[in-house]
Image: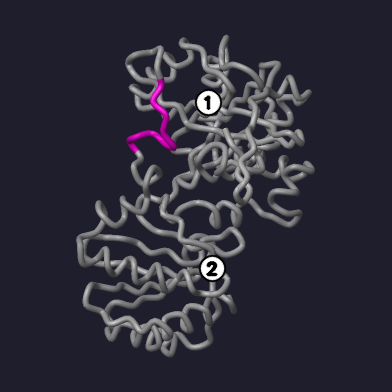
Amino acid sequence: MLRIEGREATELTATELSTEQLSEDDLREWVIDNTAEILGEDFLVIGREVGVADLNDGIDILAIDRAGNLVVIELKRGALRGSVDFQALKYVSYVSRWSYDDIKQQFEMFLQSEWGMDLHGEGATFAETLEEFCDDDYELNATQRIFLVGNRVHERIGSVVLWLREQGIDANIVQFSLFKDGTNSLYLDSKTLVPTSDLAKFETGDTPSDTPWKVDGKRWHLEERTNEDTAVLVQQLVEIMSEVRGLDGPSWTQKLYIAFRMDGTNRVLLRTWAQSVQIDIYDFLFEDEQNLLEAAANLIGDSERVGLDTEIHGNRTRLQIRCVPGDELDHDQWINFVEELVLEG
């Protein structure tokens, strides 16, 4: 592996946590702070070394995904071997019975720690944090997921994970590699490994093949979710939203929508269908509902395709505008309209 800086290329050499006198705790903090970069997905972390009743051990990291599922993340500084798979299954069976109140209690306990406070802020509440992070149609703890993270994988672990996936259980292996350069700066690389029927081999991929929107979300929305004309409309709307001040995006990795965020919260969603695109704008202030709806209708020339919700998911405000191919979109008018809502919300 090479480190590129301008025209200079510096060779990176492989190393290990133990060689660098780093512990599993160090790996855990890296994952907690960088779930998307290391695990391939954004997770809402709600626990670190979570104690499990009747066991003398704890869950390395407990999190929630955007669908509301609990995610058990087990880490090994070295190879994934031994009983790490059984350990993860015990933890998953334990949290599978947790109710809303159980998960809320765990979040509030984590919030009292320095790690939880750094992640979520001292005044965070479970309900608001959950609603802001999860998809609109999330269902809390409907199922559970497993992530096993290590720098090498023994064949038996691959066999178990393959069988779990064949049974419909979302089990994942993430292999990380550590490198350093001549200045002893460290670099972490990670990849998802998908075990195949040939248990001695793994297919490398960013995400499992049953979630193609995570592998190539742009292709998914432009080629699978939409027809040719609607795909053009999607690209026009993405271009507009990308120029709205304060919005970060686009994020293409969700199955049903393209997201634009502000301060870590979804503020604009482009929901894609074959024949139309629905723009959902969240969390804004307004004084006159009629004037707001009229202004939104002027963007597309049709009041029948505009709607307003004020009591969804913890009383969030949502404006819905459905666009169809053939709508003449005034670029500047759209940007001014959306900026006025999201920047003052």
Mark 2 Cα shell of 10 Å, populated few (<14), some (14-19), many (≥20) = many
Q: Nearer the viewer, mark 1 or mark 2?
A: 2
Determine which of the numbered discs, if any, sits on residue 29 in the image.
none
- Given residues 79 and 1, the one toward you in this image is 1
Q: Which residue is mark 2?
A: 247
Question: What residue is drawn where x is 60% and y is 54%?
Answer: 129
Point out the stretch of residues depicted in magenta.
202-210
Q: Amino acid at mark 1?
A: Val
Q: Which residue is mark 1?
A: 92
Q: Hey, which quadrant is residue 236 in on the image?
A: bottom left
Tag 1 near tag 2, CB within 8 Å: no
- Given residues 125 and 180, the one toward you in this image is 180
- Given residues 51 and 4, the one toward you in this image is 4
Mark 1 Cα shell of 10 Å, populated few (<14), some (14-19), many (≥20) = many
How far is disc 1 from disc 2 in space, using C-alphas? 36 Å
Q: Amino acid at mark 2?
A: Leu
Residue 40 % position (x, y): 50, 40
| Protein image colouring | one colour
Q: Secondary structure at mark 2?
A: loop
Q: Hey, which quadrant is residue 139 in on the image?
A: top left
Residue 186 % position (x, y): 70, 35
Q: Is residue 208 magenta?
A: yes
